Image (cartoon, coloured by chain):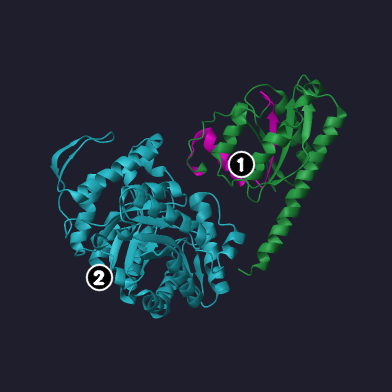
Chain colours: A green, B cyan
Amino acid sequence: MNIVILSGSVAGSKTRTAMEYVKASFNNNHPEHDTELLNLADLDIQFSDGRNFLDYSGDTGYLTKTLMEADAIVIGTPIFQASIPGALKNVFDLLPQDGFRDKTVSMLATAGSSKHFLIPENQLKPIIGYMKAQMLQSYVFIEERYFANGEITDDDVIFRIDRLAEDTLVLAETYRKIREEKEASYGF
Amino acid sequence: MDQYRIDKDYGLEFGLYTLGDHLHNPHTGERIPAGQRIKEIIEIARLAEQAGVDLFTVGESHQEYFTTQAHSVVLGAIAQATEKIKIASSSTIISTLDPVRVYEDFATIDLISDGRAEIIAGRASRVGNFELLGYELHDYEALYEEKFDLLRLINENEIINWEGQFRKPLRNARVLPRPKNDSMPIWRAVGGPPASAEKAGRAGVPMFLATLGGPVSSYKYTIDVYREAAARSGHDPESLPVATAGFFYPAETTQQAQREVYPHINDGMIRTNGRGYPKQHFAQGADPRDVMNVGSPQEIIEKILYQHEVFGHQRYIGQMDFGGVPFDRLKRNIDIIGSEILPAIRKHTKK
């Protein structure tokens, strides 16, 4: 399985830190799968102008092609102005409208306040659903106080990240089996 | 419809189109050389004419995995190799070409073919042509509208006075040669959503509608939008032809057709568009209410007649060579078209 872990912000460090833990969780507990961490802060991404995702060049083309080749994507987002960052929304805009078809997508959010807990539920899930992902319903929400010096300080958060990685794989593998069985039944 | 060379009593015209894709055969993993692909396209046009097919068209795509970028040159060769079949582009990406030069090319093809050439002008779904031919992608829409209008102006006037944004003005310019009958049919290529159909209707130009898959009723909506826009703008919808284009593939049974062609379409789309054709959607395509004409000859006949009844269109063109379908199969399919499909369509749609 080809798993892409996306850190969806060009500002700050918490989401990036969390996504490094996500990657480590896959690598340590499920080493048979390939993982790649894409950090928007390390890439020079242009705004979407509506072209086919294959027609972008440079970092933008690398980002779109890598995401489109993924079997599963874990999206990490901070909360800015009570929403996802524009940089992350732009990633969705760069992809086809049904770009997550036959992909499994799960989510992790970092935020300065627990009052933001429902932002992924209300703002991120509708986009991912619209793009036709198989979506992991539960997500990991991490408050700022559980980070220090580029590390996560709370074991409960780490346990939740491990469960997120495992659940992402369970959903992806289950859905793949169901789909393969269904497609075999078409007889062509 | 006379000016578009459409005879209403003739019934539904049946054509074949190719995008000139140059793809691997997914069953063997092999790809024929570009020269062979182009020659086979010309040969298919010739065989189609012998089978009684009304129209053969060739498209241009400036991307990897395509081979008829110079589609007007290929159409010139087809004009020479054939005698009565209509020939057209599918489509000419007018946005990134000079309409004067396009008109010169197609008027020449019209003369070579003794009045059989038509232009179908579109805007491209992939956009490699913009960089390659030196245009800005952010002018995508403005380029198309300006150049399409200029192309029509040239078709309607031998002497042109014109000014626009994307090329130098034309002052008392004569665009020569003229086509055999002084003008040629020029169609607007329209994708799925109705916005473009609305523009075609407002301008009162014939519409070529791409219908890859999905319910006939959805495309009927787009055709209604086109005709209503035409009527609102003072054009008579009865005088404006509509054509549809989509996947076409006959075999002995539905399942046989699906089994043969699905890997070609799916793999070809992954390479040229980045995503395959979802198998579930393709399976649904066999439904008589779906616009995709893949199945047994009898099923295809019934589907085309149903589409004709719903759309009231004048022309259908099918794409059966996408994704490295081997030449033998294409020849077999042309035999099926000539012996089974065409006679039935003619019989049931002729007035």
Q: Nearer the viewer, residue A24 or B268?
A: B268
Position of B88 relative to B142 (above/below): below
Disc 2 crowd rating (10 Å Cα; few below 14, some 14-19, many 20+) is some
In-image side of B144 versus B176 (left or right): right
Please name the residue shown 38% across and 40% down the image. B141
Position of A135 relative to B212 (above/below): above
Specify the quadrant that holds the C terminus of chain B: bottom left
Residue A64 percent across, percent down from the top left:
56, 40
Q: Which residue is mark 1?
A: A67
Q: Give the residue type at disc 1.
A: Leu
Q: Chain of mark 2?
A: B
Residue B276 percent across, percent down from the top left:
56, 55
Please name the residue shown 14% across and 48% down the image. B158
Q: Nearer the viewer, residue A168 or B171?
A: B171
Label disc, if present, on residue B84 of the rendered structure = 2
Q: Which residues are magenta?
A: A54-82
Q: Give the residue type at disc 2.
A: Lys
Q: Mark 1 falls on what kind of element?
A: helix
Same-chain status of marks 1 and 2 = no
- Mark 1 or 2, which is nearer the eye? 2
